[in-house]
Amino acid sequence: MIRRAGIFFLCLMCGACGGYHSPARSTWPTYLAGASMTDMTDAARVAKRPVYLGAGGRLVGDVVAAAQYGNKADADNAAAVSYMSGLEMALYDALRKPGISVQRAGTDVVVILVRDAIMELDVPDISATGDDTLKTIAQILRKYDATFIEIAGYTDAMRDTSAAHRLSLDMASRVGVHLTQHKINTARLFIVGRGASRPIAAQDDIGRLTNRRVEIRIAPAR
């Protein structure tokens, strides 16, 4: 009995030491059911809105009292700006880590995650540090739930564009799976791999590490 208890304790310890691992790729469609595997364009958000609302999604106007002046469009925009400013500050305060930045793009907020900041160096999986970071992001996104979320993966320059696309989609999907495991509604998600497009740094040794990244773009739902 003592020997069995010892083995059980060791298994628990090994599991704890092992940290997070992405589930088997064959299960990803189940985790991501309801997510759109496409760019988060204005048209795509409009098309997804009924599905999002049907899955319990909320609009910014449901959460923030719109300013009582001007026309409805101005009031809705003011509510979105206020809501997204709170989200931006929450993410900025929580994500002061190397390889991570929070930026504003109009009313949207973009979190840039350099690959090495969230994934293992030698295997395609979320690292222990990345697990903690994504848990933090998920916690904030659950609070600011009146939003759509685009997860886009990028690589550095690669000769094989098809391989670059597959790798970038793999990174984005892993992040998407992790977020859904932490109670992010898949109806909010858009997931896309963009390969080596849209580099944000030079293609030298240092720049390549920056270009390998996942960007989480968060837009107000309205």
Image (cartoon, rainbow, N blue to C red):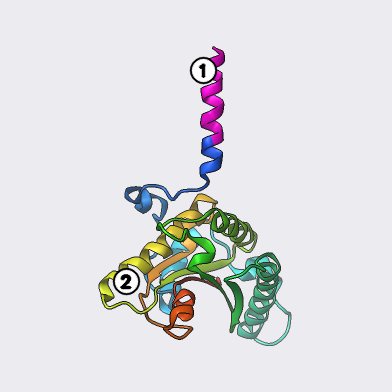
Q: Amino acid at mark 2?
A: His
Question: Range of the magenta residues?
Answer: 1-13
In the image, is 41 to the left or to the right of 113?
left
40 up-or-down from 131: above or below? below
Name the foreground residue: 116 vs 109. 116
- The percent position of residue 134, horizontal first and vertical second, equals 56, 59
Q: Tell me the CA gap for discs 1 and 2.
A: 48 Å
Tell me the element at label 1: helix
Q: Is residue 164 above or below residue 8?
A: below
Residue at left 62%, top 58%? 136
> How many numbered callouts?
2
Residue 101 in percent (x, y) is at 60, 74
Residue 35 visible within the image: no
Residue 60 rendering spot, x and y as whole percentages: 62, 70
Magenta stretch encompasses residue 12: yes
Q: Which residue is mark 2?
A: 165
Residue 80 falls in image quadrant: bottom right
> Residue 4: which numbered mark, if any?
1
At horizontal 39% and vertical 69% (from top left) the residue drawn is 192
Q: Secondary structure at mark 2?
A: helix
> Which amino acid type is marked by label 1?
Arg
Label 1 vs label 2, nearer the camera = 1
Q: Residue at x 53, y 46 (%)?
A: 19
